[in-house]
Every structure is written in structure tokens, then in C-alpha cells.
Amino acid sequence: MTTPWRFIPPLDAPGAVQMAIDTWLLDQHQHHGHPPTLRFYTWTPAAISLGASQRRQIPEHWRELVWQGQPIDLVQRPTGGRGVLHQGDLTYALVTSKIPGSHIQAYKLLCQFLIEGWAEFDITLRFGWHKLNYTRTHNCFALATKADLVDACGEKVIGSAQIRRGSCILQHGSMILTPNSELWETVFQSPAPAVNQARAAVGSGLTTDAIVAALARSAEASFDCTLISQPLTEPEWADINSLI
């Protein structure tokens, strides 16, 4: 018999809300018997999420960025890593527990559904190779570490980050699909990343809905689970809003 997991339908919301949801889900799983959960989401307005060790070490111009008439939010992630620009990306988050082994072994297990899901679109992903050394960059997508996924051309497709509390894990990550090159260059003061195979597929008509559906199917196979769709309830939203 497969294990029931909660699937929260895709949400579009400000970054502070999205991070509060992820934090709340981890707490509920750790302390209140909430089931393992998978969800996908997007960020409106555009935001830069900061890794837990990056709180005070950011470029000064990030504090004054504006795009499409709105300030770009600076949002703290509970996980590590460097800055991620959330515009034209799709984010996933999963919360589960009792994953054996080291952090890298957990990444290899938890990223398998991403590898298998993107394989439905004939896109082969593998893990990156750089050591975790961000001292010379504020940009998460400037390096592909052993926790990240690159395509057959070596271009980074998915950047992931993780936090453990006891035996419970929150892992979330960004898939950059339709970035605005001008905004990217303004934020990171470097050229926008090369068009990877995933972005090329989106440019050829692959939809976000199709990506989410494929990744949900692969999650069920990878984790031997059944995803049960359940939107956040009003009492749950009240709890989450209290964290913002």
C-alpha cells in the first residue's frame, strides 16, 4: 500500500507568504503529525530569496531594485545557499522525514522525482559537480553543486536547498523557465544564463501545468506515495499568516 502525501495545488503569492508556508509545513510535519507534502508555486511580485547564511552579505543595490513598477522583495529562506531571483521560475517544495544518510545522499534521493519527471520531456538531468563554495558570488545559479541538477549540456536547470529539523526535511528549489534577461543582468550584474534544455522546451510550448503534472506523477513513483490534493484551509492560512 502506498503512503498518502498531501499535494497543495500550485499557488502564486508574495515570497514572504511562500516561505511562511514552507516553514509552517515543516513545523506541522515535525510536531503535529502532518503528512509528507509536495507543492509547486510562483512568486508575485518578483523577489530575491536569500539563503540562511546570506542575511547581511548582499549587494547594496538589491535593496533598491524595482521591476514593472514594483519593488523586488528580499525574502529570507529557511534553507541555505545564495540568492535566487524568482521571476519566470517555478519553485517546488517537499517536506518529509526519515531519509537515511548524509545531506548529499538525501538530495540524491529527493531529487530523483525531478530527474524522472523532466525525463518525460526527453530532458536528461544529472547532479552538478562544484564544491559548495559561494564566497565569490551572490548568485545561486552561478554554480552547479552536488545538490543541483544540470542538463546534458551542463547548464543548470534546478537549484535546490535543504534544512533538517530532527528527522524531518524541507527541500525546495527553483526551476528557471522564462527569465527576463535585462532584469537578471541588473540583479546579478552578469549575463543571464544560457538557454538550457528546459527553457528551450518551455519556449517551444511546454506549459507549467504540464511540468507540474509530470513531476507529480514522478513523485508518486519515486516516493511510493499517493498524492492527495488538498488546498490550504482557512485555519491553516491563519496560522501561516501569523508567521509573516
Image (cartoon, rainbow, N blue to C red):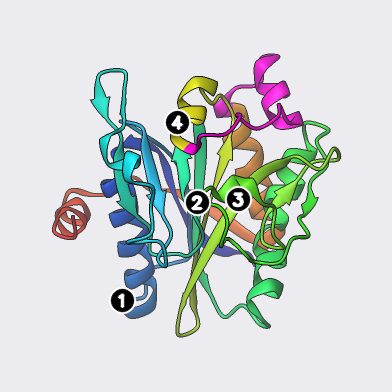
The answer to whether residue 89 is above or below residue 95 is above
Instruction: Tell me which amino acid carries mark 4.
Output: Gln
Q: Are marks 3 and 4 in contact (CB under 8 Å)?
A: no
Q: Which percent across, then down, holds residue 160? A: 58, 55
Pick the residue in front: 163 or 80: 80
Pointer 3 residue: 159
Sequence order check, earlier mark of 1 and 2: 1
Sequence order check, earlier mark of 4 and 2: 4
Q: Which residue is depicted at the point 65% across and 63% down?
A: 110
Sequence order check, earlier mark of 2 and 3: 2
Instruction: Tell me which amino acid carries mark 2.
Output: His
Q: Is residue 40 visible?
A: no
Magenta region:
188-209
Pointer 2 residue: 138
Instruction: Tell me which amino acid carries mark 3.
Output: Gly
Horizontal side, residue 210 vs residue 197: left or right: left
Pick the residue in front: 234 or 75: 75
Pointer 1 residue: 32
Q: Which percent across, then down, holds residue 178? A: 56, 24
* Cα distance between the residues tagged 3 and 4: 14 Å
Image quarter of residue 199: top right
| Most distant residue in the top direction | 204
* Cα distance between the residues tagged 3 and 1: 29 Å
